Amino acid sequence: MLPVVLCLLFTACQSGNANSSEAQQSLFKHAAGSPISVPGGAGNVLIGDVNNDKKPDLVVSGAKNRSITVLLGKGDGQFSTSPGSTIVAHTPHEIALGDVNLDGKLDLVVGTHDSYGVLLLLGDGNGKFTTAPTSPIVMRDGNQPHTHDVGLADVNRDNKLDLITVNSTDNDVSLALGDGRGGFTRAPGSPFAVGPSPYPFAIGDVNGDGHLDIVATATATGPLRAQQLPMSKALTLLLGDGKGGFRSSRLPLRTGEPWSAAIGDLNDDRKPDIAVTHHDMSKLTVLLGDGRGAFAEATASPFDFGGNVLPLMIADVNRDGKMDVVAAGGDSVRIMLGDGRGGFAPGPVIRSGPGSWRLAFGDVNHDGKTDIVTSNVESDSVSVLLAQN
């Protein structure tokens, strides 16, 4: 099995009103004790079993005191703060979990917007992390760092996790290949050029060749925004060769400034599709794939979320066998319900907490349903939303 940890997404935006109180309660409700206070701040949140007790835990990055806070799961949707927090060398903006040294314990990579260096924190299997001797991992040379996403995935099919970063000001993606012992070496050909001002990226095999591919966005939010806007109406698809190399192509969009992307089967044909949110509008763009790496925008796309959102994920949240899209923005989570044919209609809006800039999926209470966790940067908290359907 190829271990993959997908990156999480960044945004800040406003919210709207719920469709109805009944609709909200029918899908998700706050777990007991939610929202959970995180004194060091809540910039990003991940779900993973970091103390090997088979119960999902939360890992939260905090910009206020450069900390990583671990909330240990009880297996019922409730969490307790692990004693002490890990203080890191730079402000933790982007984080990803994965076992990089193959010891059966989850490790953590930490990126900051102001450095090409990524910190590697090794997990001890008890919920604690320590800085690795190989840290930091410098992903590229340059003088204008603006790292806006990190991810771990086995890109070259050697069963060892590799490290990926997005360099927003440089308009490229960097790849460092892992040796399975905590060491990383820049891949030949890295960095790989993408569209203007990329932010989060998505990873998956979009053309069915068994090699992981990357979908990069283009927000055109850099200092050359006026010149870059005409080039922002597209995603960049990096098709992997299974050895750490990529072939680039553009995926045009009817709308501009794609911010976040996610990969999933949106029309039930067993072929990967792409869902996209936008920096400049409250729309969901849907690109339907042919299973060979070509995509066409769905006939009715884009669909209106009814409020600004940026980070998104794909899951069947109402358990009807059709994939839905969940996105966060402002103080809410917005759901677009899929019809299984590539069409979407607005679903409920679930209140989470002020500044819900990140979200994560996972079954945190072991009931077989997909739950949602958001980080709420404006209230220094995380919200745990338990699936009810």
Image (tube, helix red, strand yellow):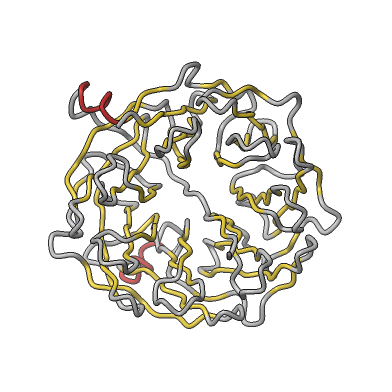
Left or right of residue 278, residue 341 in this image: left
Residue furthest toward the top?
Answer: 33
Q: Is residue 134 above or below residue 14?
A: below
In the foreground, 324 or 389:
389
Q: Identify the residue shown where x is 26% and y is 53%.
A: 284
Report which quarter residue 359 is drawn in. Answer: top left
Q: Residue 64's spot in the image, x, y percent?
A: 64, 31
Q: Identify the residue shown where x is 47% and y is 34%.
A: 373
Q: Identify the residue shown where x is 31% and y is 78%.
A: 294
Q: Residue 377's spot in the image, x, y percent?
A: 51, 31
Disc tally is 0
Q: Is residue 213 above or below residue 264?
A: below
| Quadrant containing the C terminus in the rendered view | top left
In the foreground, 224 or 49:
49
| Quadrant containing the N terminus in the rendered view | bottom right
Q: Is residue 219 above or below residue 228?
A: above
Left or right of residue 82, residue 149 in this image: left
Q: Residue 379's spot in the image, x, y percent?
A: 50, 23
In the foreground, 14 or 37:
37
Q: Residue 364's spot in the image, x, y percent?
A: 50, 33
Residue furthest toward the right?
Answer: 133
Report which quarter residue 177 is drawn in. Answer: bottom right
Q: Identify the residue shown where x is 60% and y is 45%.
A: 93
